[in-house]
Image: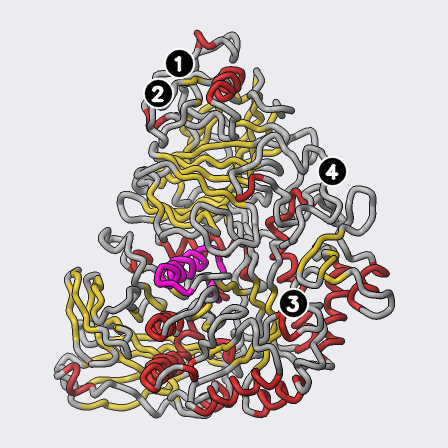
């Protein structure tokens, strides 16, 4: 007993070996599930693999056609770290561990300090070099240290080989456990590895990848690489973002999570032990372990560490329209006019890079887009908004004195440099380009100045940051990359093209404080932060940034869209799983390109995609250069009506979506949820990712296949109301086949919920002038409750100054009368319309027992 902390010390004996290179001393009879890859890097041949394997002191047993089992794996008695000293107090423990023999990787760090710190339902475990300072992620985490006494965790450790075990105090379930696995801790300069047991092997996360929502480690081995890249959604490939976090479901239906705060290139193996193996090529191991015990609590704990997401303005929840290739102001204006003419709720117009002069940031083409300022003025006069795109790469080949962003950037030394101290030059859309170092405050000031200057020409309302992985059309730079250990490390995760510099800048290039090698995965975050700061200074109200590349904490500054998704039914489905995964990453303001970006859509696909996209938190229709127009007005009357109908429903329930985003920004709770978030005890619901929910109250069951007028949907045990037909469904956990004609998406309100509503208009400005209503679904006891947050829609100082209301419907015991209450918790937003238009879906018909509403009870 020390400092009030009881430690259960597990003593596990270890077989001592004289040499890791002595094959006869190895124990190689591992069960296949416990074979952990000792040679994750590629070998030129089987012979080279065998030689390299043995030189690392590992077992080589050809897998004989079983491609799922590594031929080179760690023996049961592989050398690892042993505890030298420990000290513990109420707030945590510190260990010094030491490796006695080489790991097989260059430049071992033989002594490691392990700091274990306790928080409220979060444990931090940090492995560092006690002698030499190593790179650590420059992210301000919000982890708060607290005594361990009331924690959900139980903590144990093993001294030799050193390992840590975190279990759930109430059930004993494994949450994080590096003990007892036949895989060592390796900590060398450019290769770091650690493995942990999983509970059921069912995890969500490890992004950004094109996957289902729940990954199953027990079904097969899978390796996920994290190195941000300009690459459209592709299976088995590293994509735009890097999020080394997972949520795991436990056998007793509780949930926990693990986050590794590390921004270097890495891969994460899921193996059938079940286990997860983290490998990274730099930095430190800085783990945050989340106790949950529910999925939404895991996400709240993660956003407590990396930052709560930003709160978007109300207007940004409306319908957005864009395409790459309007090609002229005339075409742009025609698109705007024809979509207004059909009565489409239509909030925001965007432009892609074709509006620029030579695709240079902070310019527009005065010939093709002559009259663009007048178009933007017209949008504003119609209560609509305008968004521009900005890539990070700044044209560097203009005549000096003719392009202010580059001239000023050179003068203020804001660009990344090469090893010789010169500006690193790559190639992107405008040709030769320089890359801003957004990690430096001077660069943020320079970027802000450019935003101010350009806003005087084009009064845009928000920003779209694209190509910020960062993308580069030449490898590294126009002069290549030096041959050194940063550009050619001992280990490269299995990323597309197999080289860190492929389609991006040299890892050895320099920011003011860092090598790009260490912060590449954070570059998109750094630009989003600069854009968020600059826009806030400029507009002095809430707006938004949409970023293609993201990292842990990006949600504080930006939303995300799905990138270059193809116009296919498969991509429609994966847009849902991507949206659901980004809720875990703390980036709820997310959506795919409705109707698809790459390739020509069809009318049917566009209708069905809009029926899904109406429930993305961020709703935008966008397509590619050369593709057929796909804005709603180009389709048939039938298609227009279907698209307008579902978009109007979005505007109708938008106060509920706004309230969910407010709660996300203040509590971290997810906005859009897979079914298992709300029904974790229902294991049938766990793998379902073709349906999803808004908060706890709306269940969406879309059609995701062509030529289909029915959809098979699962309903966990609960009462539901079809918002279109008004039919009641009392489910005991069952699959149903629902009618889904082309003009219908099935949406069900859960019993016990009250949703605030507004009658829809063509813009949110007009809709906000209407009185509020409420969509009420009584539970089996004929009661319901709800929540609404309301303010002026874009005030920077949101929260307690504004209005928060709890709704409550209570049916009296006689089942003949009911009381509806709207209780103001805090705030007094004076422009709030009265709650005098209650949409009950004909209460007498639906519920049968409520004869009349007794009245209002408004209280403060």
> Regarding mark 2 in the picture, which secondary structure is present there?
loop
Q: Is residue 90 above or below residue 621?
A: above
> Regarding mark 1 in the picture, which secondary structure is present there?
loop
Mark 4 or mark 2, whichever is nearer to me: 4
> Which residue is denoted by mark 3 in the rendering?
390
Measure the C-alpha gap from mark 1 to mark 2.
8 Å
CB under 8 Å between discs 1 and 2: yes
Q: How many marks?
A: 4
Q: Which residues are magenta?
A: 567-591
> Regarding mark 4 in the picture, which secondary structure is present there?
loop
Residue 116, x across and y down, in percent: 52, 37
Which quarter of the rendering shows the C terminus?
Answer: bottom left
> Which residue is denoted by mark 4 in the rendering?
482
- Which tag, 4 or 1, sits closer to the chain's start? 1
Instruction: Tell me what residue is drawn at x 22 percent, y 64 percent.
Output: 713
Measure the C-alpha gap from mark 4 to mark 1.
42 Å
- Which tag, 3 or 2, sits closer to the chain's start? 2
Measure the C-alpha gap from mark 3 to mark 2.
53 Å
> Which residue is denoted by mark 1 in the rendering?
27
Position of 704 with respect to 851 (left or right) is: right
Disc 3: CA contacts within 10 A as few (<14), some (14-19) or many (>=20): many
């Amino acid at each position: 007993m020390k400092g009030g902390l009881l430690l259960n010390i597990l003593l596990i004996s270890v077989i001592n070996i004289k040499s890791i290179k002595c094959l006869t001393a190895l124990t190689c009879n591992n069960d296949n599930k416990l074979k952990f890859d000792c040679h994750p890097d590629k070998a030129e041949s089987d012979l080279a693999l065998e030689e390299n394997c043995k030189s690392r002191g590992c077992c080589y047993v050809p897998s004989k056609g079983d491609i799922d089992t590594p031929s080179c794996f760690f023996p049961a008695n592989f050398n690892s770290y042993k505890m030298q000293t420990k000290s513990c107090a109420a707030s945590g423990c510190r260990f010094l561990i030491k490796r006695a023999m080489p790991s097989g990787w260059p430049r071992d760090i033989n002594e490691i300090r392990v700091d274990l710190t306790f928080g409220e339902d979060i444990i931090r475990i940090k492995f560092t070099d006690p002698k030499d300072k190593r790179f650590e992620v420059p992210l301000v985490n919000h982890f708060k240290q607290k005594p361990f006494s009331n924690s959900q965790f139980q903590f144990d450790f093993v001294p030799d080989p050193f390992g840590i075990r975190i279990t759930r105090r109430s059930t004993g379930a494994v949450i994080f456990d590096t003990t007892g696995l036949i895989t060592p801790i390796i900590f060398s300069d450019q290769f770091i590895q650690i493995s942990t047991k999983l509970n059921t092997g069912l995890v969500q996360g490890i992004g950004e990848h094109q996957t289902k929502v729940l990954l199953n480690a027990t079904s097969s081995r899978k390796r996920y690489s994290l190195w941000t890249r300009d690459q459209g959604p592709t299976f088995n490939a590293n994509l735009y973002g890097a999020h080394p976090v997972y949520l795991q479901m436990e056998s007793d239906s509780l949930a926990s999570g693990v986050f590794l705060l590390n921004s270097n290139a890495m891969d994460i193996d899921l193996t059938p032990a079940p286990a997860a193996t983290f490998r990274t090529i730099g930095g430190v191991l800085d783990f945050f372990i989340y106790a949950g015990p529910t999925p939404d609590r895991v996400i709240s704990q993660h956003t407590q560490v990396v930052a709560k997401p930003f709160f978007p303005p109300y207007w940004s929840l409306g319908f957005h329209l864009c395409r790459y290739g309007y090609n002229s102001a005339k075409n742009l204006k025609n698109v705007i006019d024809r979509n207004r003419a059909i009565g489409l709720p239509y909030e925001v117009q965007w432009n892609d890079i074709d509006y620029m002069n030579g695709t240079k940031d902070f310019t527009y083409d005065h010939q093709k887009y002559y009259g663009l300022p007048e178009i933007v003025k017209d949008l504003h006069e119609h209560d609509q908004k305008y968004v521009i795109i900005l890539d990070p790469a700044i044209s560097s080949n203009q005549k000096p004195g003719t392009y202010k962003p580059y001239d000023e950037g050179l003068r203020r030394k804001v660009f990344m440099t090469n090893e010789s101290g010169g500006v690193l030059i790559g190639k992107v859309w405008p040709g030769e380009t320089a890359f801003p170092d957004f990690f430096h405050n001077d660069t943020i000031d320079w970027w802000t100045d450019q935003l101010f200057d350009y806003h005087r020409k084009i009064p845009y309302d928000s920003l779209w940051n694209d190509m910020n992985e960062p993308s580069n059309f030449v490898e590294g730079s126009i002069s290549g990359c030096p041959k050194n250990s940063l550009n050619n490390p001992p280990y490269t995760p299995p990323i597309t093209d197999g080289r860190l510099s492929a389609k991006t800048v040299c890892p050895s290039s320099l920011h003011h404080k860092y090598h790009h090698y260490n912060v590449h995965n954070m570059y998109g975050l750094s630009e989003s932060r600069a854009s968020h700061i600059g826009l806030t200074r400029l507009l002095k109200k809430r707006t938004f940034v949409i970023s293609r590349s993201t990292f842990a904490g990006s949600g504080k500054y930006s939303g995300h869209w799905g990138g270059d998704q193809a116009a296919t039914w498969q991509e429609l489905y994966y847009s849902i799983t991507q949206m659901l995964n980004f809720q875990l990453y703390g980036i709820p303001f997310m959506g795919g390109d409705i109707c698809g970006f790459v390739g020509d859509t069809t009318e049917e696909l566009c209708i069905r995609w809009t029926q899904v996209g109406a429930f993305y938190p961020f709703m935008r229709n966008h397509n590619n250069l050369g593709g057929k127009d796909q804005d709603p007005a180009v389709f048939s009357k039938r298609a227009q009506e279907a698209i307008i109908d579902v978009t109007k429903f979005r505007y109708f329930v938008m106060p509920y979506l706004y309230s969910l985003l407010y709660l996300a920004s203040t509590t971290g709770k997810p906005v859009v949820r897979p079914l298992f978030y709300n029904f974790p005890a229902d294991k049938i619901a766990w793998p379902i990712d073709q349906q999803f929910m808004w908060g706890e109250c709306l269940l969406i069951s879309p059609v995701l296949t062509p030529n289909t007028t029915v959809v098979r949907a699962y309903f966990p045990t609960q009462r539901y109301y079809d918002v279109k037909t008004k039919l009641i469904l009392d489910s005991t956990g069952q699959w149903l086949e629902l009618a889904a004609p082309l003009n219908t998406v099935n949406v069900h309100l859960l019993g016990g919920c009250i949703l605030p509503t507004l009658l829809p208009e063509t813009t949110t400005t007009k809709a906000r002038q209407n009185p509020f209503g409420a969509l009420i679904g009584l539970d089996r006891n004929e009661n319901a409750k709800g929540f609404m947050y309301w303010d002026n829609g874009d005030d920077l100082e949101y929260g307690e100054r504004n209005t928060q209301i709890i709704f409550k419907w209570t049916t009296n015991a006689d089942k003949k009368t009911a009381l509806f209450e709207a209780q103001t918790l805090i705030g007094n937003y004076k422009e709030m319309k009265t709650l005098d238009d209650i949409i009950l879906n004909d209460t007498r018909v639906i519920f049968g027992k409520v004869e009349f509403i007794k009245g209002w009870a408004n209280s403060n």
